[in-house]
Image: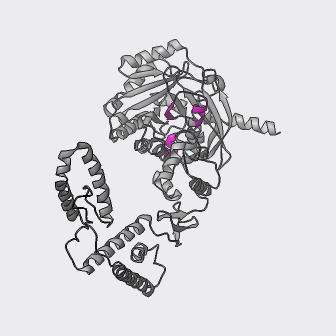
């Protein structure tokens, strides 16, 4: 046992804190104690082995031969004899005398003891027994691991500027860092990172089983989720039971079932909006998430563009919107949430690092587990290089083009710094780098505004302009979005006849073309209507 313990402790977490001489003395003492245990075991047991398999088999054969006359006399008698025979075998294995199952008058009624097995040196038997016993003890000690409590400083996983952690070997002897309340990004951490913090992959998986359902791990019954110690450790790491980094402060439901929810970011107190959009026919729900507070692209038809850029959202704040969306969809008995689109407040191409981290968590099968084809990241296209960056993300790309002609596009998107041809070619080159045919698909978004970009000539120019993309993409899908009112003078929604005429030109040219059904416009939840300036003004007036 001591020898096994010395082997188990011979590592950095065990004896590393002792001087070299002390470690050697420990090992020598352990080996000496093991030798003494073997000697005591050999001396203590002095009786020879009472049975072996070969001798047992021979005796059974002899007894069966002797019983043959009885078998011929009576079938019932043989049953009783065999039962007695079996009991005698059990007694014989324990060293008791064996009586033949014959009548009292039989001369064979004398007690019969089994012969001793072939002789062998006593020390050989005793040493074998001692070795087996020591091996069993070592195996048991190794299986349960020796519980040691040794502490050493270790940098936190969140960076060198964080406080130092302590290592503890407990229970199953896994090294678990004792963290201060520093899990600042639970949902954007990888499963392995979370497992390291919680002390086991099973605990991390239990956390994500709850998050995928829109539940807090603390809300799941203890027998079905985390154990009490694991909950306490997660609470210690989070410094609270708040899972999401955004807090819902209001919800607005439209007549079509669309649900818009306003959230406050915990780090900055800024407000953002997200929208749950249940499909009108198919059993699915889409969540439109925001990637920024405000936007600096300045699209004249977009309410978010009037805010200007206030700040980028972190990956955790983006994922918090998804967590809330899952919970609300379940609460409202909506169809399953299957699609995530980065088409809310902000331009995803202007916050690529945080959007990329969020997409990794969304499409990781061990975390949110959304298919890559069900996640769409949209951008106006600040530069051709942005497309190359977004092409590395596990999501479908969408380009908010709005017009093919440069002059008209600069009018609609005043922040444009590159020609539409430069941006198109940059997108084509980015699509060519994508490994899968399915991920080479691209969506082109066009917001149609009455008497501005909805003419027949605009449709023809768009069809010709997108031709070079067809060679780089497996599918060019054009999404026509009738303008949603944002209280801008001179901007109006075109008639549906005009929208269908525009669509027919693109369909005739061989493109996949769809007209987006307006959802949530009665509660300012439709495309281009998301803004929090009005909410902030209302809050200030209420406080006043």
Whether residue 540 is situated above or below residue 412 in the rendered picture: below
Residue 468 is situated, as x and y percent measured from the top left of the image, at 34, 31
* Quadrant showing the C terminus: top right
Residue 299 is situated, as x and y percent measured from the top left of the image, at 57, 33
Q: How many marks?
A: 0
In the visual, does 101 lie left or right of 156? Answer: left
Q: Within the image, what quadrant is residue 318 found in? A: top right
Identity of the residue drawn at 33% across and 75% down: 130
Residue 169 is situated, as x and y percent measured from the top left of the image, at 50, 67
Whether residue 270 is situated above or below residue 29 in the rendered picture: above
Task: Report the coloring of the rendering.
Answer: one colour
In the rendered image, the residue lying farthest to the top is 497
In the rendered image, the residue lying farthest to the right is 544
Query: Does the magenta run of residues contain 432?
Result: no
In the visual, does 455 lie left or right of 421? Answer: right
Query: Does the magenta run of residues contain 352?
Result: yes
User: In this rendering, does residue 384 appear at all?
Assistant: yes
* Quadrant showing the N terminus: bottom left
What residue span does the magenta drawing correspond to? 327-355
In the rendered image, the residue lying farthest to the front is 105
User: In this rendering, does residue 413 appear at all?
Assistant: no
In the visual, does 86 lie left or right of 514? Answer: left
Pick whichever, 156 or 455, lies toward us. Answer: 156
Residue 492 is situated, as x and y percent measured from the top left of the image, at 60, 20
Identity of the residue drawn at 48% across and 56% down: 200
Q: Within the image, what quadrant is residue 404 found in? A: top left
């Amino acid at each position: 046992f001591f020898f096994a313990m010395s082997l188990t402790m011979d590592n950095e977490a065990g004896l590393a804190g002792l001087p070299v001489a002390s470690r050697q003395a420990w090992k020598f003492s352990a080996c000496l104690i093991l030798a003494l245990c073997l000697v005591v075991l050999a001396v203590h047991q002095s009786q020879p082995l009472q049975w072996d398999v070969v001798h047992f088999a021979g005796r059974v054969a002899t007894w069966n031969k002797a019983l043959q006359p009885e078998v011929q006399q009576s079938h019932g008698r043989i049953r009783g004899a065999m039962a007695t025979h079996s009991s005698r075998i059990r007694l014989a294995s324990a060293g008791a005398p064996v009586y033949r199952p014959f009548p009292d008058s039989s001369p064979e009624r004398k007690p019969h003891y089994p012969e001793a097995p072939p002789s062998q040196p006593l020390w050989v038997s005793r040493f074998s027994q001692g070795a087996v016993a020591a091996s069993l003890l070592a195996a048991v000690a190794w299986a349960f691991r020796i519980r040691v409590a040794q502490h050493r400083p270790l940098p936190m996983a969140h960076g060198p500027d964080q406080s130092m952690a302590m290592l503890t070997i407990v229970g199953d002897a896994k090294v678990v860092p004792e963290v201060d309340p520093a899990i600042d990004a639970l949902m954007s951490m990888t499963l392995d990172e979370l497992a390291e913090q919680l002390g086991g992959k099973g605990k991390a998986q239990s956390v994500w089983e709850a998050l995928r359902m829109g539940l807090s791990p603390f809300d799941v019954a203890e027998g079905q989720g985390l154990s009490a110690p694991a909950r306490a450790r997660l609470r210690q790491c989070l410094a609270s039971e708040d899972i999401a980094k955004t807090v819902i402060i209001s919800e607005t439901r439209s007549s079509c079932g669309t649900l818009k929810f306003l959230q406050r970011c915990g780090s900055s107190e800024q407000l953002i909006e997200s929208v749950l959009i249940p499909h009108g026919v198919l059993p699915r729900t889409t969540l439109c998430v925001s990637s920024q507070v405000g936007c600096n692209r300045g699209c004249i038809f977009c309410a978010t563009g009037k805010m200007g850029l206030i700040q980028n959202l972190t990956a955790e704040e983006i994922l918090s919107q998804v967590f809330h969306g899952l919970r609300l969809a379940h609460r409202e008995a909506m169809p399953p949430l299957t699609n995530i689109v980065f088409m809310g407040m902000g331009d995803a191409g202007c916050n690529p690092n945080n959007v990329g981290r969020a997409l990794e968590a969304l499409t990781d099968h061990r975390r949110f587990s959304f298919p890559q084809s069900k996640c769409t990241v949209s951008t106006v296209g600040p530069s051709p290089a942005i497309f190359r960056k977004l092409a590395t993300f596990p999501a479908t790309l969408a380009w908010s083009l709005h017009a093919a002609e440069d002059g008209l596009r600069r009018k609609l998107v005043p922040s444009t710094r590159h020609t539409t041809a430069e941006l198109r070619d940059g997108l084509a080159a980015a699509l060519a780098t994508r490994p899968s045919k399915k991920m080479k698909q691209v969506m082109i978004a066009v917001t149609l505004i009455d008497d501005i970009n909805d003419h027949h000539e605009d449709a023809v120019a768009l069809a010709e302009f997108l031709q070079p993309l067809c060679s780089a993409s497996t599918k060019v899908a054009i999404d026509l979005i009738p303008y949603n009112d944002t209280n801008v003078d001179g901007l109006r929604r075109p008639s549906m006849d005009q929208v269908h005429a525009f669509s027919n030109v693109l369909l005739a040219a061989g493109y996949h073309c769809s007209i987006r059904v307006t959802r949530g416009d009665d509660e300012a939840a439709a495309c281009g209507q998301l803004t929090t300036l009005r909410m902030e003004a209302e809050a200030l007036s209420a406080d006043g």
